[in-house]
Image: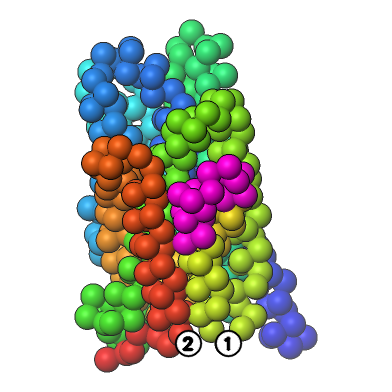
Amino acid sequence: MPATTRNAPDRAARFGFAFIGVLLIAVNLRVSFVSVGPVLANISSDLELSSAAAGFLTSVPLIAFAVFSPVAPGFASRLGLDRALWMSLLILAAGIVFRSLPVPGFIWAGTALIGLAIAFLNVLAPSLVKRDFPTRVSQVTGSYTATQAAFAAIGAAVVVPVAQTSPAGWRLALGIWVGLALIAMAVLLPWLRRHTSGTAHATTPEVSYRSPWASALGWQVTLFMGLQSIAFYVLMAWLPTIEQSRGVPATTAGIHLSVFLLVNVFASLATGGILHRGSDQRLVSFVSGALMFITFLGLALAPNLTLLWVLLGAMGCGSLIVIALSLFSLRTVNYPQAASLSGMAQSVGYGLGAIGPVMFGVLRDVSGGWALPLLVTAAIMAVLAVMGVLAGRDRVIGGV
C-alpha cells in the first residue's frame, strides 16, 4: 500500500483533532471576562467598589491584552507553541478560580491572570491556525471567531440567573467557566504529550523572517486590527446607553444587544467562508469598514432606525474581526512571524480598543449629546475602510 494512502487516515485524524483543539481554545477566549458585566453591580455592592474601581475592573483584561500580547511570541518560542497554549489555559483556569475566592484582593489578581492568559491565547491561536491549517486560514478563523462570540453570548445570558439562584452568588456565576478551561486542557493533553519531543524542531522557523514592527504592511494590519476593535468596544460599552437615552426601554435595548451578538456569529462564519475566494481581501475589508461607517453615521443622523444600524454594525463587526485575525496568517511567511504580527497587532489593537470607549465618553461629556462622538467614530471608521484596502492587498511581510 502506498505511504500516501496509509497516511491519509492519520492526516485526517490530525486535522480533526487540531480543529477541535482550536475550537476548544476559542470557547475560552471571551466568556470569562465578558460575563463580568451583567453581574458588575453585584460585585460592586459586595466588595464596596466605587464606580471608578468597578470600571477599572472591567478594563483590566483589555490592559493586560495590550501589555502582554507582545510577550506571547517569546513565550511560545521558549516552550513550543502547543505547550505555550496549554500553559495559557492553565493560567486562565487559575485566574478564574482566584477571582471567585472570597479572599481580599484575589478578584484583582485573578482578573489580571485571566487577562494575561487570554492575551497569550489571542496571539497564539492565529499562529496555530497558520501552522496547522495553512490552506484553510479564513475558514478556520471564521469558525473559531464565531465559536468565541457564541459562547460569549451564552455567558452573558447565563451568568445572571446563576448568580440569582446560587447562595454563592456572583462568585459561582463567574467561577463555573473554569470548567471550560479544564475541558480544553484535558482534551489537548494527549496531543501535547505526543508533540513534546518535536517541540524544538517545531518552534524553529524554516526560514528567517522580517519583524512586522519594521514593516509598513505590519503597521497597516495593526491599525486595521486596532480601528476595528474601537468599533466593537464602543458599541459594547455605549449602545444600550445611547438607546435608553433616546427612549428605548431597557429590555428592548438588551434584546438589540443580543441580536447584535447573534448576527455577529453568523457574519463571522460567512466571512470565513468567502474570504479566501478572491485573489486578495481588499473588497471585503473595505465593505466591512464601510458598514461600520454607515452604522455610526446612521446612529448619529437617523436614530429612529436604530435596529437597522444594529444589524449593519453586527455584520460589520463580525466580518472585521475574522478579517483582522486572518491577516495575521495571510500576510506572513511562517507561523513564528504570524505570532509576532499577532502580538504586535493585538497589543496596539486592544490598547486602542480600551481607549475608544473612554474617548467616546469624553466627547459625550464635552458636547452634551451623542452626535459628536458618533460622527467622530464614523470618521475613524472611514480610516478603517482605507486601512482595509491597504492591508487587504495580496502581499506578505518580506523575508530577510
Task: Find the magenta span and give its range.
Answer: 293-309
Coordinates of residue 46 in the picture (x, y in percent): 33, 12
- Mark 2 or mark 1, earlier in chain: 1
- Is residue 299 a member of the stretch shown in magenta? yes
Residue located at (34% from left, 27% from top):
99
Q: Seen in the image, is 153 located left or right of residue 112?
A: right
Q: Nearer the viewer, residue 254 or 341?
A: 254
Residue located at (25% from left, 33% from top):
56
Q: Nearer the viewer, residue 150 or 133?
A: 150
Q: Residues within 10 Å of mark 1 (few under 14, many from 20)?
A: few
- Rendering quarter of residue 396: bottom left
Residue located at (33% from left, 35% from top):
58
The residue that disc 1 covers is 279
Q: Seen in the image, is 347 located left or right of residue 267?
A: left
The residue that disc 2 covers is 394
Coordinates of residue 399 in the picture (x, y in percent): 32, 90
